[in-house]
Image (tube, helix red, strand yellow):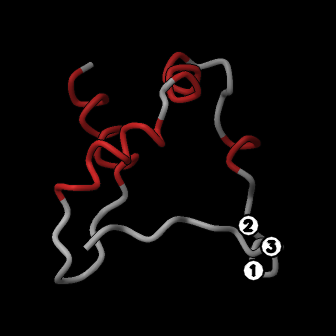
Amino acid sequence: MRPKKHRTTGWNDLFRARLDQIINLKHELVQLAGKIDWDWIDGEVAPLYSENGPPGIETRFMIGLLLLKHT
């Protein structure tokens, strides 16, 4: 089954630190993530998911780990 889209509600984020306050936005991996067309990759990988079973892992997470492992 395809993973569910991540959405922020705002009501439970009151005490959560924002990611842009934690990481260095000038880091090479952060800049690379901004240049990748994640919607296109998600559309290409979508037919590979089964319609049955639990929701899968998000495509961005899987591809990000693969890129990190490769580097």
**In the rendered image, which quarter is residue 46 located in?**
bottom left
Q: Which quadrant is home to the N terminus?
A: bottom left
The CA distance from mark 2 to mark 3 is 10 Å
- Image depth: mark 2 or mark 1 in front: 1
- Could you tell me which secondary element the residue under label 1 belongs to? loop
Question: Could you tell me how many numbered marks the image carries?
Answer: 3
| Of the pair 17 and 2, the residue shown nearer to us | 2
Does the CB distance between marks 3 and 1 fall below 8 Å? yes
| Of the pair 48 and 31, the residue shown nearer to us | 48
Disc 1: which residue: 12
Q: Which quadrant is home to the C terminus?
A: top left
Looking at the rendered structure, the kind of residue marked 3 is Gly
Tag of residue 57: none
The first of marks 2 and 3 along the sequence is 3
Say left or right for 49 vs 63: left
The CA distance from mark 2 to mark 1 is 8 Å
Looking at the rendered structure, the kind of residue marked 1 is Asn
Q: Position of residue 40 (x, y in %)?
A: 42, 37
The CA distance from mark 3 to mark 1 is 6 Å
Tag of residue 10: 3
Disc 2: which residue: 16
- Could you tell me which secondary element the residue under label 3 belongs to? loop
Q: Position of residue 11 (x, y in %)?
A: 81, 81
Q: Residue at x 64, y 36 (%)?
A: 23
- Image depth: mark 2 or mark 3 in front: 3
Looking at the rendered structure, the kind of residue marked 2 is Arg
Q: Residue at x 20, y 77 (%)?
A: 51
Q: Position of residue 19 (x, y in %)?
A: 68, 48
User: Quick one: label 3, few (<14), some, or many (20+) residues within 10 Å?
Assistant: few
